[in-house]
């Protein structure tokens, strides 16, 4: 597998180290890759402002693409979906295999607990993270919404005076220090609480997961894939 890493920041550098025997290009601009160099797949750990150009470049060169960058707009998401009709794209806000497993069991848990449990999400990250809530928390929220019998309102943080509404999901972001990434989904019922938690102890887990995504994507037909697909 010959991989091009798009994004030379902290995660890109970790990915380059973890997949040293597979990385053949390490760039901040897809156009920096020698057009003659064989590339099986591109992994993106860059900045959301670069995704538009990245999508265009991968279509032009026929590169399958794993997008791990978060913080993009709805407009960019629409372009990702449209581009996936031309090249295979795997989109994941978090490439941790543990997070993927949580997403797999979340639907069943929500359906069993939604009637009598309040749902809250807490995510914690380092003080340099620029988007809040995290892409993973957003994905959890979307998966919960899709599993509910009806849509709940989403409350980001809390302030002021007033009781919690029954049909809402609370999402809370903590930023500080060098926290790699922690996520907790809380189901709070009467006299009992169910929690699902995931704690990243290093960023290496995201690089390992991204490489698994890249391997999965090689040879696939144009479509929009997710982490769930690598388990099927």
Image (cartoon, grey):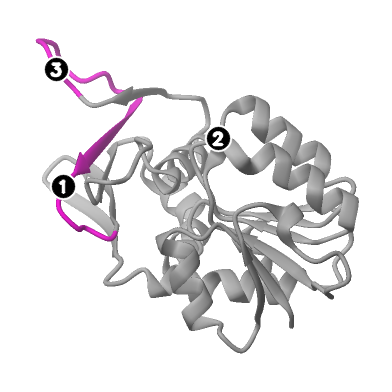
Q: Is residue 151 left or right of residue 177?
A: right
Count how many numbered circles sit on residues in the image.
3
Picture quadrant of residue 92:
bottom right
Q: Earlier in the sequence, mark 2 or mark 3?
A: 2
Could you give the CA–CA distance between mark 1 and mark 3, rounded to whole angstroms?
A: 20 Å
Q: Is residue 4 left or right of residue 134?
A: right
In percent of width and height, residue 223 lies at 82, 52
Observer-side mark, 2 or 3, equals: 2
Q: Is residue 165 magenta?
A: yes
Outermost residue, top side? 161
Q: Is residue 32 left or right of residue 16?
A: right
In percent of width and height, residue 135 lies at 45, 44
Q: Residue at x 29, y 23 (%)?
A: 166
Tag 1 residue: 176
In percent of width and height, residue 138 lies at 44, 39
Decide: few, some or many residues near mark 3? Use Cα within 10 Å; few <14, some 14-19, many ≥20: few
Q: Are marks 1 and 3 in contact (CB under 8 Å)?
A: no
Decide: few, some or many residues near mark 2? Use Cα within 10 Å; few <14, some 14-19, many ≥20: some
Q: Are marks 2 and 3 in contact (CB under 8 Å)?
A: no
Could you give the CA–CA distance between mark 1 and mark 2, rounded to whole angstroms?
A: 22 Å
Residues shaded magenta: 158-180
Tag 2 residue: 72
In percent of width and height, residue 128 lies at 28, 46
């Amino acid at each position: 597998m010959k991989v091009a890493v798009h994004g030379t920041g902290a995660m890109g550098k970790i990915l380059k180290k973890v997949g040293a025997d597979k990385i053949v290009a390490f760039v901040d601009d897809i156009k920096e890759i020698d057009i003659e160099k064989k590339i099986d797949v591109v992994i993106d750990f860059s900045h959301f402002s670069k995704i538009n150009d990245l999508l265009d470049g991968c279509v032009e060169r026929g590169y399958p693409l794993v997008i791990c960058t978060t913080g993009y707009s709805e407009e960019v998401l629409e372009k990702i979906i449209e581009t996936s009709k031309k090249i295979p794209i795997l989109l994941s806000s978090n490439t941790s295999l543990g997070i993927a497993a949580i997403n797999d069991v979340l639907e069943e848990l929500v359906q069993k607990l939604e009637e009598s449990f309040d749902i809250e999400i807490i995510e914690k990250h380092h003080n340099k993270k620029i988007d809040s809530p995290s892409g993973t928390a957003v994905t959890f929220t979307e998966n919960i919404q899709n599993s509910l019998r009806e849509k709940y309102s989403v409350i980001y943080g809390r302030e002021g005076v007033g009781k919690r509404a029954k049909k809402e999901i609370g999402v809370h972001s903590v930023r500080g220090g060098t926290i790699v990434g922690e996520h907790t989904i809380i189901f709070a019922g009467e006299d009992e609480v169910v929690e699902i938690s995931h704690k990243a102890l290093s960023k290496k887990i995201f690089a390992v997961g991204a490489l698994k995504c890249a391997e999965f994507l090689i040879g696939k037909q144009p479509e929009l894939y997710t982490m769930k697909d690598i388990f099927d």
